[in-house]
Amino acid sequence: MNSSLKNVLFSLISAVGLSYCFFTIVQFAIYLYKSGLGDKTVRGPEGKCKFGKQEDPTWVQPLIVDIFLIAVFVLQHTVMAADWWKRLLKDSGCGILVRSLYIIATSLALQVLLSYWQPLLPCSPLWEVGISSGSFWLFLLFLLHALSWLMMLAISLTLDYAEMMGVKQVYYSIMGLPQPLHLKSEEHKQLFRHFRHPFSSSLLIVLWVVPVMSLDRFILALGLTAYLLLGHSLDTEDYLYLKEQYELKEEQLWQARF
């Protein structure tokens, strides 16, 4: 393939990955809000289920579908993070697209999960804390969720968002520069190996701290929690490096203002 055409194609793929990821994250955030803070109760003033059925429908088939969707999501992450997959792309001449393709596939897997996710026993939540609209406690929960999403964004920026999305790899390749990860310190490389997801602790807050926990949200929260806890292994050195990078970014932003 012509070098210029290849650069254009790789640039388009990285741009698609970046925009598709942003679009998917927004949709995922909206879904988590609606299923967590949007529904503060499953019953109306007369005690009837708002979902239209007093008796819950069969739950076995939806449960199987939801578990399958989580398994597909985790399998996609596991396969595309494996060394053999990265070597396969590198041998095919697409090594710089490892992150971009990973991001596109992750976004697609999450879109499939959101599109085909099945409600489970909507009239029988695992817990339901009575919180009225406009109450202080609802505001506090909303603030906690908002801060959690902001923390995810801050950590992503600290870890170099452009590199995580695969955009910087393509740009560096076009410019004839070494791959960005090769220019990083050993501490950064170790952190990136241990911590592929910058969302872990903050995402757990968004998943679990809700006034109403339906069974299907519980399955989703449980599956993602298990993956996040088993798939990543931060240590003290990683934490100290992340803290150092955050303070450095904060100092740079402060200096840029003056």
Image: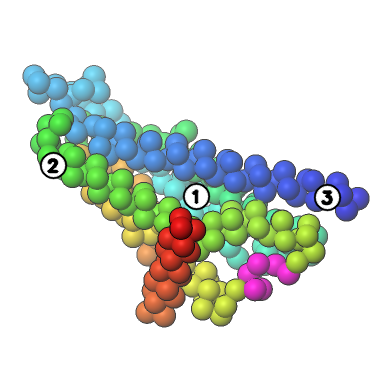
Q: Disc 3 versus disc 1: distance between alpha carbons?
A: 30 Å
Placement of 218 over or under 250, stated as above or below = above
Q: Which of 119 and 173 is in front in this view?
A: 173
As for residue 198 lying within the magenta part, the answer is no
Amino acid carrying mark 1 in the image: Phe
Q: Disc 2 versus disc 1: distance between alpha carbons?
A: 33 Å
Residue 186 in sight from this viewpoint: yes
Answer with mark 3 or mark 1, whichever residue precedes in sequence: 3
Q: Position of residue 164 (x, y in %)?
A: 57, 58
In terms of secondary structure, what is the magenta stretch mainly? helix
Q: Which residue is drawn at 19% across and 40% down?
A: 139
Please tell me whether mark 3 sits on a helix, a strand or a loop: helix
Disc 3 crowd, CA 10 A, few/some/many (<14, 14-19, 20+): few
Placement of 214 over or under 155, stated as above or below = above
Amino acid carrying mark 3 in the image: Lys
Q: Mark 1 points at which residue?
A: 73
Residue 126 in sight from this viewpoint: no
Residue 137 badge: 2
Q: Residue at x 67, y 48 (%)?
A: 14
Q: Name the residue under label 3.
A: 6
Range covered by the magenta-colored residues: 178-183
Answer with mark 2 or mark 3, whichever residue precedes in sequence: 3
Amino acid carrying mark 2 in the image: Trp
Tag 2–tag 1 contact (CB < 8 Å): no
Tag 2–tag 3 contact (CB < 8 Å): no
Left/right placement of residue 128 relative to residue 241 reads left
Please tell me whether mark 1 sits on a helix, a strand or a loop: helix
Q: Residue at x 72, y 61 (%)?
A: 172
Report the mark closest to the observer, 3 or 1. 3
As for residue 182 lying within the magenta part, the answer is yes
